[in-house]
Image: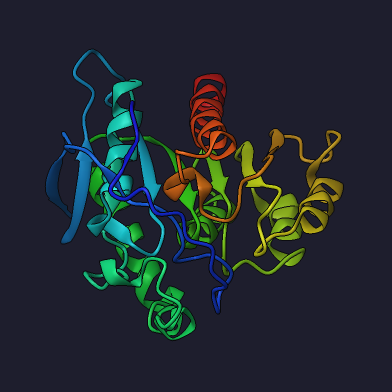
């Protein structure tokens, strides 16, 4: 798809929580539909052609949730690749507001404190249960930024069969990945940038030491895109070639991972 920034402005800022609210919003016309699953509002992308009705991809958004067109367009893109894709409003209607993007005065840490797992994980579980009631038997998950830590949790809890995590936040390293090594069974793809201040290259290499070189039997791969900071897979400045390459490349790699394991 073509990414059209709503503004040509390129902003460099320092966030209280890395670059969790930095980036660009894209224009576009989302093609999916809003559905209620298990009492949770979801944005659902349904393939137009034949697809496996027993499989569903759960897309866990960044902190901007279903209010950000970028996230809806991502759902649409996965649906176009043949996957029933469901993005639950696990933020309970309280996503970060649009004015938070690139706003150094927005208190990211305070927002995070109001969206801890005790209130944000239950909606995800309700959606999974509702989909199971509709005949879905196998799940994959793709989590971005704030949603990345929940993708990791779903892998650890063996809820999903395949997991893709792009530039996660709120993840304790190395603990989370040591737990994956001990408990998870889902092949894991990590999409990272070399400018990520939330999970530095050094930390990424530490994850490799835990899961790489065949240590994690289900399958593990990490990609690190040059010139890309935290959030690039969702909110990259596509007027910058390296960021565009990272965004498009990480999506293509995610699809390839799903095609291989899901």
Where in the figure is residue 12, as x and y percent of width and height? 54, 63
Q: Is residue 10 left or right of residue 100?
A: right
- Residue toward you, 167 or 9: 9
169 lies above or below 212: below
Task: Single out the residue that lies furthest toward the front.
Answer: 9
Q: Is residue 79 visible?
A: yes
Displayed quadrant of residue 260: top right
Q: How many numbered markers are drawn?
A: 0
197 lies above or below 231: below
What residue is rendered at 49% in x and 65% in y? 20
What residue is rendered at 44% in x and 66% in y? 21
Position of the N terminus by quadrant: top left
Where in the figure is residue 195, as x and y percent of width and height? 68, 53
What residue is rendered at 37% in x and 66% in y? 101
262 lies above or below 207: above
203 lies above or below 219: below
Where in the figure is residue 49, as x and y percent of width and height? 21, 13
Where in the figure is residue 253, as x and y percent of width and height? 56, 27
What residue is rendered at 44% in x and 56% in y? 23
Q: Is residue 97 visible?
A: no
Q: Is residue 73 left or right of residue 117?
A: left
Task: Single out the residue that lies furthest toward the top.
Answer: 50
Q: Is residue 134 left or right of residue 258?
A: left
């Amino acid at each position: 798809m073509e990414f059209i920034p709503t503004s040509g402005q390129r902003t460099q800022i320092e966030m209280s929580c890395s670059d969790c609210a930095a980036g660009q919003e894209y224009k576009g016309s989302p093609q999916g539909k809003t559905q209620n699953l298990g009492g949770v509002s979801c944005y659902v992308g349904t393939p137009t052609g034949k697809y496996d009705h027993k499989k569903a991809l759960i897309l866990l958004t960044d902190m901007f949730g279903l209010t950000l067109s970028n996230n809806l367009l991502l759902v649409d893109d996965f649906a176009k690749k043949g996957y029933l894709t469901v993005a639950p409003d696990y933020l309970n209607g309280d996503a970060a507001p649009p004015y938070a993007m690139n706003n150094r005065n927005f208190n990211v840490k305070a927002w995070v404190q109001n969206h801890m797992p005790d209130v944000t994980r239950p909606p995800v579980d309700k959606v999974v249960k509702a989909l199971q009631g509709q005949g879905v038997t196998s799940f994959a998950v793709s989590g971005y930024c704030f949603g990345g830590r929940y993708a990791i949790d779903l892998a650890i809890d063996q809820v999903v069969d395949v997991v893709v995590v792009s530039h996660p936040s709120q993840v304790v390293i190395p603990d989370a990945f040591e737990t994956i090594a001990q408990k998870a069974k889902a092949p894991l793809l990590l999409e990272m940038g070399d400018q990520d201040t939330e999970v530095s290259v050094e930390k990424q290499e530490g994850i490799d030491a835990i899961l790489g070189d065949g240590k994690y039997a289900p399958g593990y791969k990490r990609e690190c895109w040059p010139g890309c900071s935290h959030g690039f897979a969702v909110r990259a400045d596509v007027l910058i070639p390296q960021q565009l390459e990272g965004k498009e490349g990480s999506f293509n790699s995610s699809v390839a991972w799903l095609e291989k394991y899901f």
